[in-house]
Amino acid sequence: MHRTLASSAPSPTRPPRLQLPCPATLVEALLRRASGRGAARPLFTALGAEGQRLEQLTAVELLGRVRATAAALGEVGTAGDRILVPALPGTDFAVAFLACLYAGRIAVPVPPLRPAARRRPADCADRLGAIRRDCRPVAALVASARDALPGEEGAGLAWIPVARAPGHPDLLPDPAALDPRAVALLQYTSGSTSEPRGVIVGHAGLMANQQAVRDRCEVDSATTVVSWLPFFHDMGLCTGVVLPLVSGAAAVTMEPSAFVRDPLVWLRAIEAEEDVFAAAPDFAYELCVRRIGPAERGRVDLSTWRVAVNGAEPVRARTLRAFADAFRPSFFRPEVFSPGYGLAECTLGVTLGRPLYEAPVRRYDRDALARGTAVPAASLDTAVELVGCGPPLPGVRIEVVNPATRRVLPEGAVGEIWVDAPGNCQGYWDREAESARTFGARPAGSAEGGPYVRTGDLGCLDGGELFVTGRLKDVLVVGGENYFPQDVEAVAGAAHEAFAHQRAAAWPLEEDGPGVAVVVETAERDPEVLARAVRAAGVAVARALPAPVSVFAVARHLVPRTTSGKTRRRDCADDLRAGRLPLLAQWSSLPPRPAGPSERRRSV
């Protein structure tokens, strides 16, 4: 069933927004901003760890620094060459990213070159090395010359400091900077199910996607975007840099570490503005509930928060409820939440809830979902609670397709989500065969629309809303029916207080025999409590899933995740099998395996 929805009507609390001609590229948007009426108004404001203002740039100042940095890039390579843009502090990332585009180069956002202590340097080096091998960049932009990587790590790259002052006022943008058909950036996927791949994002797709978000959420010059999201991730890049330029809004940003250290800094920054758009993954709202106490909640005013996007990982109804309940004294309204769904292959957004309309939460029958149909649950014991991620953004068409037959499924049926949108990207860098499979899909027996992006995600359409049920590659097949790992993880986490609000990973025990494995993080260390917890989780999962169950408790931060916070279930399975996960406790409904000859000799 085809679902092409028009932009929602303006909300009753805001007057209709004046429709202005849309710039064709982000550089054109910057040029317009720097020559318009708001040219002297702060565009980007960077906050420190305590929420103090570190730096501010108007559009005119930003353009001056962009031109100076683009002039330095002009000395290296040619148009179309790739440039690494690490997540730089303050306003440096925005300058570096836009300078790449201004110079006609292809920006490649990457994590910080020197990671924080909590992140494993080897993991970051491996990821950076994989990206360099894939796209062969000629240079990297850094905050200062001393930030260049030494030795072999830095060999083969020109290290260019971001300009600290305006320069080259007469420098014109490279023709590619004003060509909507040109490539703007490579957005490397976070690698939840595979090695990172460079998604080719064109200027036209980037603009179309964020213009659709702008129109759905009525973001304009009266709005301030407040973000702590990492710039090397698609949601952080679009929210913190692209959307403000496309919409005329201002942006207030801070380092991700500032939010993790004290989530209240984010909320205080929201409180300081008049009309706020802010986006974050589900875990961020949960962290606010756990880390900000009742007394602090009573001293923060969130009444100016108009759009609170929840996306980038599964949206949980319990998180929406918990945050709304916890911050009711802060004047937060539940209808401010706008759950969304998107992926790098479509630039970012695909669906998004309408602001000031409460997100629908539906309880579907677990067994019916396993058979591929979304029907209301008869009781809470058999229910899976799913949050509607909104209708498609303006201009976006979604089909739910049987992944085996490629036939379009009716509303209420669960299948793979396919997307036809102006923001669909051009493919994966230097991977033609894989690009054709993912970006060139067409439903069987239908010539309408397309080509589509195959998302690899499963879901259904219900009343015009998209409900996401899980990843196709992560599905647990039990007795010929499909179960979703996040549901199993939720059941395990809810079974005992030692596992409450903790990360979990579930997958089929294909190599070790029939059944399902669940690894749950915990801060608990009492062996007796842990023994009860793993047993409670195992019993709860076994009641919900007709299969043998094995549950393993591990310390916090040991379940692998991607750079955007998604659980890497395959890597977790590999770590468990290889003995790389130190176990605190375990329980299994599987019968013990007979000991092999070597194991019997060790037990003698």
Image (spheres, rainbow, N blue to C red):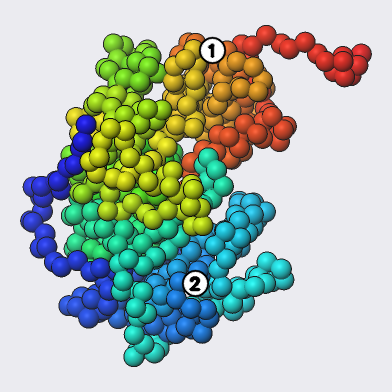
Point out the tag, 2 or 1, that comes first from the N-terminus: 2
Residue 137, position in %: x, y? Answer: 55, 68
Q: What amino acid is labelled 2 in the image?
A: Asp
The numbered disc on residue 547 is 1
Q: Mark 1 packing: few (<14 Cα in 10 Å), some, or many (20+)?
A: some
Image point 42% across, 58% down: which residue? 200
- CA distance for labels 2 and 1: 52 Å
Q: What element carries label 2?
A: loop
Q: In which quarter of the image is residue 364?
A: top left
Helix, strand or loop under label 1: loop
Whether residue 276 is visible: no
Callout in the foreground (2, 1)? 2
| Viewer-closest of 98 and 90 | 98
Q: In this view, does 150 lie above or below 9?
A: below
**Which amino acid type corresponds to the residue marked 1 in the rendered image?**
Ala
Residue that appears at 10% across and 47% down:
9
Residue 203, quarter of picture: bottom left
Q: Mark 2 points at which residue?
A: 81
Residue 219 appears at what percent x and percent y? Answer: 21, 57
Q: Residue at x 39, y 65 (%)?
A: 183
Q: Farthest residue toward the top?
A: 591
Is residue 159 left or right of 466 when viewed as pictured?
right
User: Which percent across, then down, holds residue 125?
Assistant: 64, 57
